[in-house]
Image (cartoon, rainbow, N blue to C red):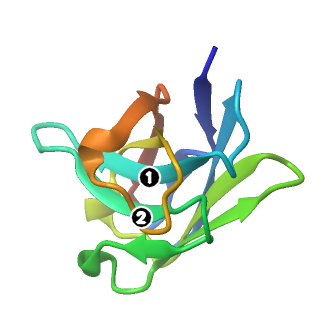
Amino acid sequence: QVQLVESGGGLVQPGGSLTLSCAPSGFTTDEYAIGWFRQAPGKEREGLSCIANSDGFTAYADFLKGRFTISRDAAKNTVYLLMNNLKPEDTATYYCAAASGDFDICPPTYEYHFWGQGTQVTVSS
């Protein structure tokens, strides 16, 4: 059974950093493309970043302006999202998702069929 578990969320002050983890079970991170998404109350879900499984290709939403970094630790079978210089507008529930297939670029959102339960990130002083 394919499952994804996010962790690492919490309360952080503006300008601070957090690292989110996405640990899948039932598959290894090199079998699926992994993406990070977030959704704030009253807003639509937005894609943040992804890492393709074929060649490790990574991509980021333009609005992040280099503040977030996605990475994969194959030995720990975990994908991370390092978030720096966090702002109050980053407050949201963050989700990781997996897309089955051999991707050398980030797949479109509709390809992500497996989703975690989400982890809350709150940026506030």
Crowd tier of the residue under label 1, counting other residues whose Cα lies within 10 Å: few below 14, some 14–19, many 20 or above = many
Q: CA distance from mark 1 to mark 2?
A: 5 Å
Three-letter amino acid code of the residue under disc 1: Trp
Q: Is residue 21 left or right of residue 37?
A: right
The quadrant of the rendering that contains the N terminus is top right
Residue at 18% across, 37% down: 41
> Vertically, is 120 above or below 81?
above
User: In this orientation, which residue lies closer to the viewer: 55 or 88?
Assistant: 55
Q: Is residue 93 left or right of residue 53?
A: left
Three-letter amino acid code of the residue under disc 2: Ser
Q: Which mark is residue 36?
A: 1
> Vertically, is 81 above or below 87?
above
Identify the secondary structure beneath mark 2: strand
Q: Are marks 1 and 2 in contact (CB under 8 Å)?
A: yes
Residue at 25% across, 62% down: 89
x and y percent of residue 91 in the render? 33, 52
User: In this orientation, which residue lies closer to the viewer: 28 or 23?
Assistant: 28
x and y percent of residue 58 in the render? 50, 73
- Give the farthest residue toward the front: 102
User: In this orientation, which residue lies closer to the viewer: 64 or 58?
Assistant: 58
Tell me the quarter of the picture where residue 113 sits: top left
Viewer can see residue 76: yes
